[in-house]
Amino acid sequence: MDDAKNKTFWKWYFLGGAGWNYEKMQGLGYFYSMLPMIKKQKTIEEQKKMAETQMQFFNTNNTVAPIIMGVDNAIQEEKGVEAVDTIAALKTGMMGPLAGIGDTLFHVIPSTLIGSIASYMALEGNPIGLIFWLLYGFLRLFCMRKFYAMGYKEGSKIVDELGNRLKKITQAANILGITVIGALIPSVVSAKFGFEFNWGEVSMSLQEIADQIMPKLAPTLVVFLAYWLLGRKKMNSTKVTLLLVVLGIVLYNFKILGV
C-alpha cells in the first residue's frame, strides 16, 4: 500500500468521524481522509472537481467504510475525474447496505456481548474486562485494514475488467442508492394526515383514505417537498430544515398533519 493510500486509511481511522454534522453527516471526515488521493490529481481544477465529489453526504458504519474507500481509491487512481459520477453513485449505493451490516457486526453484537461481560466483571471488582475491549479494538483495526485492501482490489477489478462500461455501473449504483433511500423513507420520516371530517355520526379520516391510495403517503410527500426545495436557487439543507420545522408546527396546529 503506497503512502497516499496509507494516509487515507489512517486519517479515516483516527478522524473519520471528525466534523460530523446534520448536513453532510460523515462527509467532511470522508473528504479529509481522501485528501492525499485528491492531491494526486493533475490540475487544480481536477482537484476541485474531485473534492466536490468527496465532500458529498456520506454516512455508514466506521468499521466497514474502508471497503467503500478502497473501491473509491482504486477507481480514482485509474480514471481520475472521469469517474466522479461513478464514485458518487457507488458511495451512495454502498453506504446504506454496509451500514446495516457494520452496525450489527461491529457495534450491536460486540457492545452487547463484551459490554455485558466487562460490566459484570467490573461489578465484581475484576478489571480484566477492559482487556476484552482492547483486544476487540485490535480485531477491529485488523478487519478495517482487510476491508480496505478488499475494496481496493475489487475497485481495480471494476476498472480492469469492465473498462468503458463504467456508465452501466453508475446507472446500477444510482438505482441501488435510490432504492435504499426510498426504503428508508417510511422508517425515518414520521408523518401522517391528521385531518378528520365529521358530520353527525359520519366520520372520515384523511389518513385512512390515503392508506388505501398509497401506504406512507405523507412521509413520501414530505421527502418530495424537501427534494424539490433543495433544487431551488438560494436554497440549502439548513434553510429547508428550518422551513420544514415551521411548516410542521403550523400544519400540526391546524390538525392537517400529525405524528
Image: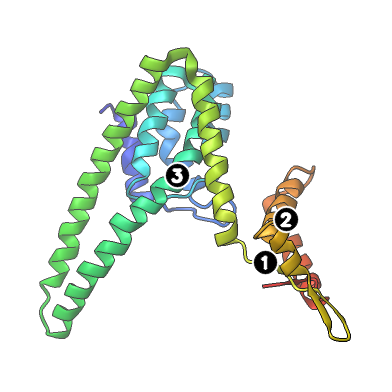
User: Residue 122, percent across and down?
Assistant: 16, 80
**Callout 3 secondary element:** helix
| Viewport quadrant of the C terminus | bottom right
Write the residue at 50% across / 46% down.
58
Label 2 vs label 3, nearer the camera = 2
Write the residue at 72% across / 57% down.
213
Instruction: Name the mark on residue 147.
Output: none
User: Residue 196, percent across and down?
Assistant: 81, 76
Task: Name which residue type carries label 1.
Answer: Ala
Write the residue at 71% across / 52% down.
226
Residue 170 visible from this viewpoint: yes
Alpha carbon of mark 1 to alpha carbon of mark 2: how far?
Answer: 9 Å
Is disc 1 in contact with disc 2, using a CB cutoff of under 8 Å? yes
Depth check: give the residue in front, 118 or 164.
164
Circle 3 Cα neighbour tier, 10 Å, few/some/many (<14 / 14–19 / ≥20): many
Residue, disc 2 = 221
Depth check: give the residue in front, 227 or 59.
227
Q: Is residue 153 above or below residue 146?
A: above
Q: Which of the 4 quarters of the picture holds residue 252?
A: bottom right
Residue, disc 3 = 95
Alpha carbon of mark 3 to alpha carbon of mark 1: how far?
Answer: 25 Å
Instruction: Name the mark on residue 191.
Output: 1
**Callout 1 secondary element:** loop
Q: Which of the 4 quarters of the picture holds residue 146?
A: top left
